[in-house]
Image (cartoon, grey):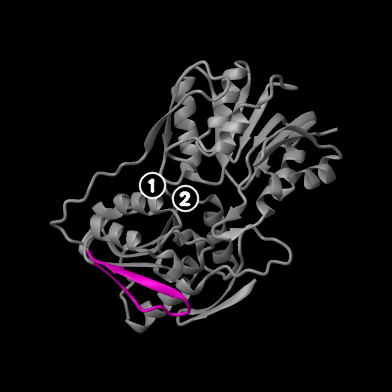
Amino acid sequence: MEQLNVPQGQFFLSRYPIRKKENLRAWDAADEYILNYLAENDVDLSGNLLIINDSFGALTTALSEYQPTLITDSYLAQQGADYNLKQNERFSDEVQLLDSLQQPTEPLDVALIKVPKSLSMLEEQLHRIRPFITENTVIIGAAMAKGIHNSTLKLFEQLIGPTTTSLAVKKARLIFSRLDADLSAPKNPYPLTMTLENCGFAHTQFELSNHANVFSREKLDIGTRFFLQNLPKEIPGNRIIDLGCGNGVVGLMAAERFPEAELTFVDESFMAVDSARINFQRAFPEREAHFKATDCLHGIPKSSTDLILNNPPFHQNNVVGDFIAQQMFRESRQVLKQGGELWVIGNRHLGYHVALKRLFGNCTTVASNKKFVILKAVKR
């Protein structure tokens, strides 16, 4: 927990999920830049205020007295905002938390956008809020300078209107855009559709629907393709979890191989979970499955699952590390039944076998190539 000092006040903020010995802040210089700019320019925040992509709730907490709406694709960002609001004794019930598949219901007076790493995500978000922007809406984007490119500014210009940028302060920049009511904006291309074929053992061509923030939206990545080619040929029971499911393609293939299996798709991205839901229901309209946006396996009963299939991410926002994978492994052991199996794919250099052997007491290599390794750990 560290203290953010800005014109709006002093706030104690924590990154979420809470980890011991955290050495990273819950905000960046772009957050500070926005808050300072709003105060120095006396921007009227008394109207309908929207905040987009507030990773840990720094903006939402500092501006909570204006009862903002926060839109994010991250379950963790929602939980982080709620945690920091309560930690600072702010009225969390006065802040509206929406996921990325929702949108405002009234015209916006101020829109604050933390520019996401994914240009596709930004494109979809600008499409989603454009109908609620007026010529009087104050639109401010923000990011570290290295995250703002010509393509970023071009998107604002194509979808909103005239756009300018600020000077850099502490390596952060602001983007100012205003609505051109006469602008003929292109149609929203998302979700994208791709055909899945030739992936090992699929007997059917599956049409996959991918929202803007889904990993490998336009084609199957080589790691997932290798995983699909080496999925289990038998399972110790009939309950399967696709952990970190993305568009659900791994669970989809498992469902095809095991017609009697009960599938659960889990991800912290609302767009990922919804893509998995669409794809499963399209492929297997007569079957039921469960879809859950959550933090790793939070909320899944202990000792309830026979097989977990996992392609862990190795970053949260812009921070690279194996901390999410480690959490996934720990919680997988809790959720698996005795004799249940965790199958993991990862880059060879990540050394997941060390953590799995420490947690499970065993770890075997199912398959490997020059880049990837597939590992299996069994709960004894």
Q: Depth check: give the residue in front, 9 or 341.
A: 341
Helix, strand, or loop for circle 1? loop
Q: Mark 2: which amino acid?
A: Asp
Q: Tell me: 130 left or right of 267.
A: left
Q: Quadrant of the N terminus?
A: bottom right
Left or right for 371, reference 290: right
Residue 103's spot in the image, x, y percent? 35, 50
Relative horizontal placement of residue 168, taking residue 75 as reference (left or right): left
According to the image, label 2 marks what residue?
73
Residue 16 image offset from top left, x and y in percent? 61, 59
Q: Quadrant of residue 38?
A: bottom left
> Tag 2's secondary structure?
loop
Return the residue at label 1.
102
Quadrant (top left, top right, bottom left, bottom right) of the C terminus: top right
**In terms of sequence position, does the residue under pointer 2 or pointer 1 come before the other?**
2
Please tell me whether residue 72 belongs to the stretch shown in magenta.
Answer: no
Is residue 176 covered in magenta? yes
Span shown in magenta = 163-178
Characterize the local packing of mark 1: few (<14), some (14-19) or many (20 or more) Cα atoms within 10 angstroms.
few
Residue at position x 51%, y 38% from top?
A: 273
Q: Nearer the viewer, mark 2 or mark 1?
A: 2
How much space separates mark 2 and mark 1, taking CA atoms? Answer: 10 Å
In this rendered view, identify the residue nearer to me: 300 or 125: 125
Identify residue type, mark 1.
Answer: Gln
Check the image and name the residue furthest to the left.
182
Which residue is at the far front? 370
